[in-house]
Image: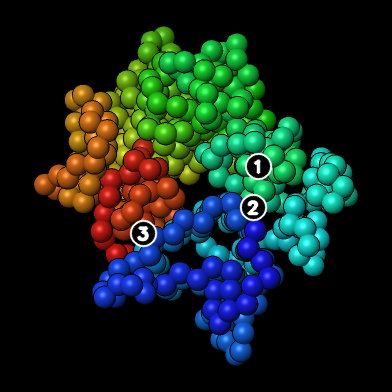
Amino acid sequence: VISTNTAQAGAGIYVGSNPGSSSDSVRESVTIVNCTIAHNHLSGSYSSSTGGGIHAVSSDIVVSNSIIWSNDAEAVMLLSPTSGSPVRYSDIEDGYPGQWNINVDPMFASSTGSDYHLRSTLGRYDPRTDTWILDGSHSPCIDAGDSQDPVGAEPLPNGKRINMGAYGGTAEASKGDEPFVWHVDGESGRDSNTGLDAGLSRSRAFATIQRAVDEAWPGDTILVWPGTYREAVNLKGKAITVQSADEVAVVTAPAPAYYAFNFWTAENSECVVRNFIITGCEDAGIYCNNASPTLANLTITNNTLGIRCEESADPDIVNCILWNNEKDLYHCEARYSCMAQEDALTRGIGNFKDDPGFADPDNGDYHLMSRDGRYSPLTGTWVKDAVTSPCVDTGDPGMEPGREPMPNGSRVNVGAYGGTPFASLSRNAW
C-alpha cells in the first residue's frame, strides 16, 4: 500500500531517467504488481499532465493487478512509455487504456484511507479485530486480476483468480467465488482431479479440455498447458474463455472426430478460444453452427477446412493464421488475418496473403521468424533470424499486445503466439 505521500509529481511512484547516468537514453525498468496507490497528494501548483498516483517519464514500466485511486491530478501519467500496453488488469480512476482495465470505485473498507482491504459479501479481513466480517457490498476488484497469475495465499473461497490491489495473492485477500480458473495438462493431469489450484502444481489439472468445459460456468477461464490434445471439444454454448496457459498448446481431431473445436447454436462473442495451434483435422479445425464465438490468435494449418460455418453462424475471427488448408474459410470472414486463399482475403479488413514465415513447420514449430528475436523451444532461448515474418505487428491495431515481451512494436502479432510471452519480438514503432 502506497498512500498519503506528497510530492510535486508522482506522489505515489515517480519513475524517471537514472540520475546517475550520463546518457539520456538510459531508461528505468519498473514492474508494479498488486499495489494499492491511493490518497497521495501533489504539492504546489500542478497541471493536468501530472500524475499524482504514478508519474513516469520515458521508462519501461508495467503496471498490473493494481488499484490507483483518490490521488491528485491524473491517476496514472506515463510519458513516452516503452511498452504500447503498460497497464493491464488494474482499476484506474478515470480510466486508462489496456487489457481488462476498469474504472470503478474499488470499495475500500475505509473511504478515508485507514483500511484498504476490499469490501466483500463473502468475507473481508478486519485488522482492528483480527476477524473476518461480511459487507453489504462487493468490490469489483475481487477476482479481477490477471487470470494467469497464481492466487497465492488467498483464502477460500477465492474464485481461483487473484484480486487486484495490495492484498491480492495474500492471506488477507477479500473473498470471492466467481469466476473460476480451470487448468488442463495432458501430460500430468487426470480427469478425476478437481482442475483447480493447479497454477503451481499441474498434477492437479484435468487431462482433457472437454473435461474442463464440462465443469466450467459462464465467465470462467480454462488454461491449457503445453502439449498435443487429441480431442473434439464441444463448447456447449458456454460463455467461457479457453486459451493456452504458457507455450501454445496443439489441438487435433483424428478420425472419426471431424473438428478440434465445435460450436452449436448458443455461443456468442463472450465465448472465446485463443492462442492455439489447430492442425490435422479431417473436416475443419473449427465448426460453427448458429454460433458466433470469438476466435482470436489461432494458427490453423494442414486441415481440410480451416473454419467451417453453417446456418447463421457469424464468428469474430481476428489475428489468425490460416495456412496450408485445402480451404481456409467456409461461409465466414476474418479480419487482420493471414490467409492463403484469395476469396477469403477479399472479405473482412486488414487481411493479407504472405507466407507467414514459420520457424520450422515441418517439425511443428510455428513461432514466427524475426530479426529482433524468436523463441526457440528446442533450446529454450531467443534466437535471431535473417527475416521477419509479415505476421509480426500486423494484428488488429485496436487490440493490446498483452503479454508480448519487449520490444513488441506496440501492436499484437498475428497467429497463436500473439499476445503471449512467446511472441516474436519487433522494434517497430506504431
Residue that label 2 marks: 166
Q: How far apart are marks 2 and 1 (CA)?
A: 8 Å
Residue drawn at the location 36% of the way across and 38% of the way down: 416
- Which kind of residue does numbered mark 3 sit on? Ser
Residue that label 1 marks: 170
- Which kind of residue does numbered mark 2 sit on? Ala
Can you say whether 283 is above or below 152 in the image? above
In this rendered view, identify the residue nearer to me: 146 or 292.
Answer: 146
Q: Position of residue 61 (x, y in %)?
A: 43, 61
Q: How far apart are marks 3 and 1 (CA)?
A: 32 Å
Can you say whether 388 is above or below 231 in the image? below
- Which kind of residue does numbered mark 1 sit on? Thr
Are there few (<14), some (14-19), or many (20+) residues within 10 Å of tag 2? many
Q: Where is residue 294 in the image (x, y as percent from the top left)?
A: 50, 41
**Left or right: 9 with respect to 228?**
right
Residue drawn at the location 46% of the way across and 56% of the way down: 31
Residue that label 3 marks: 410
